[in-house]
Amino acid sequence: MVGESLELALSRHHFDARLLPPLSDHASTSALAAQILRARASIVILGTTLDAGDPWMGTIAPLTRAGVDVVILTSTTDRACWGQALRRGARAVLPKSRPLNDLISIVRRLTDGLRVLDVREREELIAHAVSRDIELAGLRERFERLSRREEEVLEHLRNGRAVSQIAALDFVSPATVRTQVKSILAKLEVTSQIAAVGAAHRLGWQPPKTLDPQTRFQPAPAQLRHPMAHTSPPARAAAG
């Protein structure tokens, strides 16, 4: 509904706007970017969660390199996520709570070649993103200290299991599991099981299905959404 309303509103303001059709949930970032580029839009409005696993995030840089102005419309209020989108080349990030006229004003300013985001605000948002990256890098390093067995115990904790339940499932004594939990907390530099589980969630850590470290920090894939393309009158635009 948001995409259709935006398409109609832009059209009423004499912009050539089109809502691009959704792709498969398994579409790659390159396929998403290629679909948008085929629309030959000068401005693209992307509706995205800005989660690390959202494939639309990966389209921002290639679209920007192709000369497309990308505007992000998102439900998140996480300023570090906003900064990540700006680092990749987005011209502006707007929360979905903002009035539709604000988005139309940004499209108009981009069409006229005007700045849409204050330089200082842009730098502050990017600084939030950089700070988050540094924090996650340190957290990732601490998770890499865990042994395979400690990873298995952490996954049990993440699933809400108590020490006694873990011991029964893995045929070891509760004392052994308590020792392993203490080791996990020490290596992650946290003071509680809740904090350890929270750190795993923040990092996007996945249970040990493989020893390949490159597969251990991948967030779950996000649902795909429509992009909307838009360009200046009589050019073309896209949104999603």
Image (cartoon, rainbow, N blue to C red):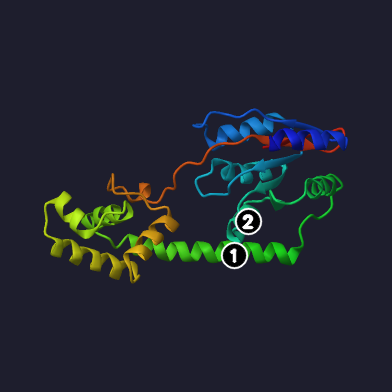
The three-letter code of the residue at mark 2 reads Trp
Residue at left 54%, top 66%?
131
Q: In this orientation, does residue 204 appear? A: yes
Which class describes the residues within 10 Å of circle 2: few (<14), some (14-19), or many (20+)? many
Which quadrant of the view contains residue 158? bottom left
Marks 1 and 2 close (CB-CB < 8 Å): yes
Q: Nearer the viewer, residue 6 or 26?
A: 6
Residue 74 x %, y %? 64, 48
Quadrant (top left, top right, bottom left, bottom right) of the C terminus? top right
The three-letter code of the residue at mark 1 reads His
Q: Earlier in the sequence, mark 1 or mark 2?
A: 2
Mark 2: secondary structure? helix
Q: Is residue 113 left or right of residue 81?
A: right
Which quadrant of the view contains residue 40? top right
Q: In this orientation, does residue 41 appear? A: no
Q: Nearer the viewer, residue 22 or 4?
A: 4
Q: Which residue is mark 2?
A: 82
Q: Which residue is mark 1?
A: 128
Q: Is residue 62 left or right of residue 91?
A: left
Residue 220 x %, y %? 44, 44
Quadrant (top left, top right, bottom left, bottom right) of the N terminus? top right
